[in-house]
Image (spheres, rainbow, N blue to C red):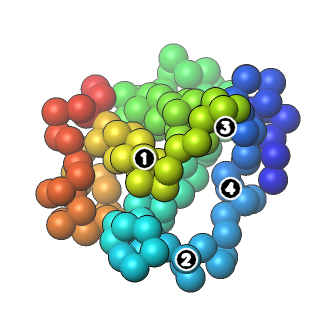
Amino acid sequence: MLSRELHNQGIYPPVDIAPSLSRLMKDGIGKDDTRDDHPRVANQLYALYAKAQETRNLASIIGAEELSARDQRYLAFADDFDRFFVGQGEDENRSVIETLNVAWELLSRFPREALTRVSETDLAHYHRSGDKAA
């Protein structure tokens, strides 16, 4: 589904992730189709984005400046997720592997213990501990 809000922010393509979640995706991703971590990364991103959307709603009520540092991290994650993960240039032809690497850049902003839907092997291989946000 397309999002007018994302379109108004200049994000292309303006795909609204939550209602666009594919129930069929599991049949075309993973070790033999894309990369072994793909299903776990997708689950982790979706879980964090859902929490970030809740945080956005809270911020719209009480104001972003009233949020905890943890909630501020979720807000920053949501903004960067929209801009860098969903958003691509009209002429960009980003591969699935490149997209998974962008996903790990975003996930690496969280401490390892906050990432409960990826494996320890995934974390050891892809998580960049030095890139955590405050």
- Mark earlier in primary sequence (2, 4): 4
Please, what is the three-letter code of the amino acid marked with disc 4? Ala
Label 4 near label 3: C-beta < 8 Å? no
Question: Mark number for residue 98?
Answer: 1
Give the label, 1 or 4, closer to the camera.
1
Mark 2 burial class by Cα count in 10 Å: few <14, some 14-19, many 20+ = few
Give the label, 2 or 4, closer to the camera.
2
- Mark earlier in primary sequence (2, 1): 2
Question: Mark number for residue 18?
Answer: 4
Tell me the CA gap for discs 1 and 3: 30 Å
- Mark earlier in primary sequence (1, 3): 3
Please give the residue where the numbered disc 2 appears in the rendered image: 28
Please give the residue where the numbered disc 3 appears in the rendered image: 57
**Extreme residue in the right direction:** 4
Q: Is residue 58 visible?
A: no
Tell me the CA gap for discs 2 and 1: 17 Å
